[in-house]
Image: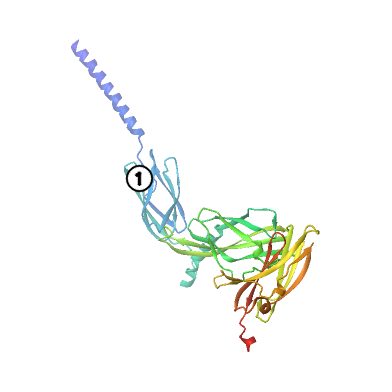
Amino acid sequence: MVKKLFASILIFVLILNGILITSSFSVHAKTKKVTLNKKNVVLSVGGIKTVKLKNTSKKVRWKILKGKKNIRIIKKSGKCKNNIKLKGKKPGKAVIQAKHGKKTYKVKITVRKKKTKKTEITPQVSTVKPKEEEISEKTEAHITGKILNDGLTTEDSLLLEYYYEGPENVWSIESVAPQKLEIYSNGEWIEIEHKDFDREGAWPFTWNKPLQKDIHLTDFNNVKPGHYKYTELFHLIQYYGDDMFNGKIENTFTIEVPVEFDVTSPEFLAMGQLEKNELKNTDSLEITYMITVQDEKYTYDVRPGYIKKYTQWDTVEEIIGFINPDYNYCQTMTGSCSFHLTLPIKECFGELKPGKYKYVHLIGPKERTVELTFYIVDNETEKK
């Protein structure tokens, strides 16, 4: 009886132990090992391949340990960011690391030259290949312009906003003078001359922020009602490397950004045209004025003008008024009209030194000003 009882107990213990062992084995079997799908990767310059850390339960942190100039990580995906896409940048070797919890996993990468057709080429031809790739990069970069104000008249300013879209490895973007204003007439675009002939300058484009510009239409000669196109030139510098400070210049190129708009006539429009803009003291300012008003009963005054002399840095040095009272006149006019004005330079303003000047004429009750740029050239020949 005792032997039978002991045997029963022994069988029960063995069965129970077997169940526990089987259960433990099944639990252990469900826990899969974290592994890389590739430990060695070979790709060409410009090529893309995917590396995956399998069976992850925590967020994976990827890092390029060696060869940052040879590869770059272009995308991370997956619930735990366990998938990455690599792109070859430059021939050479690299090592990337995936960190999952406290454990790390490494992948060795070899970047090879891009395969080309086997033809007899000289070293000079082989250097052209990167330039072809640069051209494809240029097409990705573009700037769009937007006009912020409508209903422009010839006396208004054109308010513009520019946006950049393209590669992130752009070092600097700036608009470069001179800009171009054109009017559409008789089926073609005709350029309007800027009053400041030696105008130069540049406006930097802050990264990720639109560039706003204010273009005064009165800075151009004889802007009249019509359809216009304004073209801005942007100079871009693209770098190659880990960052803009440690990289080197890869591309420099220019993008033209045109915007079209309409201009109407204001309530009161005054324009002037010089017969010549290079004069001597013995010459006269020969000016033709055109006045346009919407109401032909509109009455306005034509008042005396004055001259502004500029330094070499385009800043005002002095204002020169009339020295001859015979030319210090004021007359009242009504409606649209045109008139001609002759001002002997030496009699009206005295001896002017060679340099850049502007004649400023005040017209109308709203103090409309017409500014005309001219230059006094050397008078030595005349003095002899």
Against 59, is 176 above or below?
below
Crowding near pointer 1: few (<14 within 10 Å), some, many (20+)? some
Coordinates of residue 361 in the picture (x, y in percent) = 69, 67
Q: Amino acid at mark 1?
A: Lys
Q: Is residue 272 left or right of residue 159?
A: right
Of 61 and 96, nearer the camera is 61
Q: Is residue 20 left or right of residue 327?
A: left
Tag 1, which secondary structure?
A: strand
- The C terminus: image quadrant: bottom right
Q: Residue at x 73, y 70 (%)?
A: 329
Of 25 and 149, nearer the camera is 149
Residue 357 sits in which quadrant? Answer: bottom right
Q: Is residue 183 left or right of residue 308?
A: right
- Which residue in the structure is indicated by mark 1? 99
- Whether residue 182 appears in this view of the structure is yes
Of 66 and 194, nearer the camera is 194
